[in-house]
Amino acid sequence: MKIDSTTRIKKEFPNFKYFVVGDGPLLNKLKKESHTLNLDDVIVFTGARKDTQKILNAIDCHLFLGPKPLLGNANMEAMACGKPLIIYAPTKVDCDIAKELISEGVNGYIAKGEDELLCDVLIILKNPSKAREMGQNARKIAEERFDFSKHVRKIEELYFAVVNRKHAECNY
């Protein structure tokens, strides 16, 4: 979301805070733009953090603007913490990847452009009960699709199926 979009949100939601987590190459540019637009009281630049749980507990939704990977830990951690996702996916490939995480309107939104991104944020902020429901759905989806122990069991099952088939073929 462009920093200047935050001024519109601030008008409707005076207590709105926008956490920018990370320390990528655009950090200084974003800080400067934020200061120029008098958004120092709205945008919180946290830098790189190891205490993501603390940040995730403080937010209403998780907004992922990139860079890739869309299927990285940040989005899955937010889902596991029961936060609705909004992923900025300007290309068809990005959209296809985002669909692995998001069921549109169920646990979040996929925004293909800047206006849609702003609209999705406003929908979440204006509808706290819908946001809670989406967050619960996000957690459920994370548990079903991304539970590490389930993946290990599936790999074990596949391994044993292959080994047993080989043994059967070799008449052990």
Image (spheres, rainbow, N blue to C red):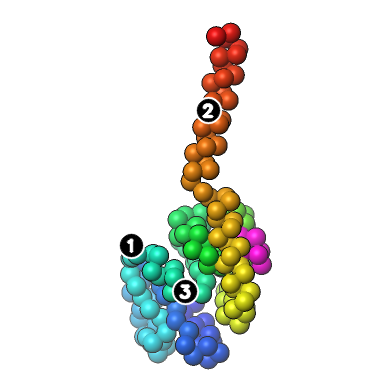
Density class for disc 3 (Cα within 10 Å; few <14, some 14-19, many ≥20) is some
- Is 103 colored magenta in this rendering? yes
Q: Is residue 35 above or below residue 108?
A: below
The amino acid type found where label 1 is placed reads Lys
Q: Are marks 3 and 2 in contact (CB under 8 Å)?
A: no
User: Which of the 4 quarters of the picture holds residue 74?
Assistant: bottom left
Q: Secondary structure at mark 1?
A: loop
Name the spot of residue 127 as percent of width and height, x first.
Answer: 62, 79
The amino acid type found where label 3 is placed reads Ile
Number of disc labels? 3
Q: What mark, if any, has residue 159 been given in the picture?
A: 2
Could you say which is closer to the camera, residue 116 or residue 75? 75
Horizontal placement of 53 versus 156: left or right?
A: left
Q: What mark, if any, has residue 96 been given in the picture?
A: none
Q: Which residue is mark 3?
A: 59
Q: Which residue is mark 1?
A: 50
Tell me how far mark 1 sits from mark 3, CA to CA: 16 Å
Horizontal placement of 112 versus 52: left or right?
A: right
Image: magenta residue range: 102-107
User: Which of the 4 quarters of the picture holds residue 154?
Assistant: top right
Name the spot of residue 152 as percent of width and height, x first.
Answer: 49, 39
Residue 130 visible in the displayed image: yes
The amino acid type found where label 2 is placed reads Tyr
Q: Secondary structure at mark 2?
A: helix
Q: Residue at x 45, y 78 (%)?
A: 18
Q: Is residue 166 above or below residue 97?
A: above
Name the spot of residue 7 as percent of width and height, x first.
Answer: 49, 87
Tell me how far mark 2 sits from mark 1, CA to CA: 35 Å
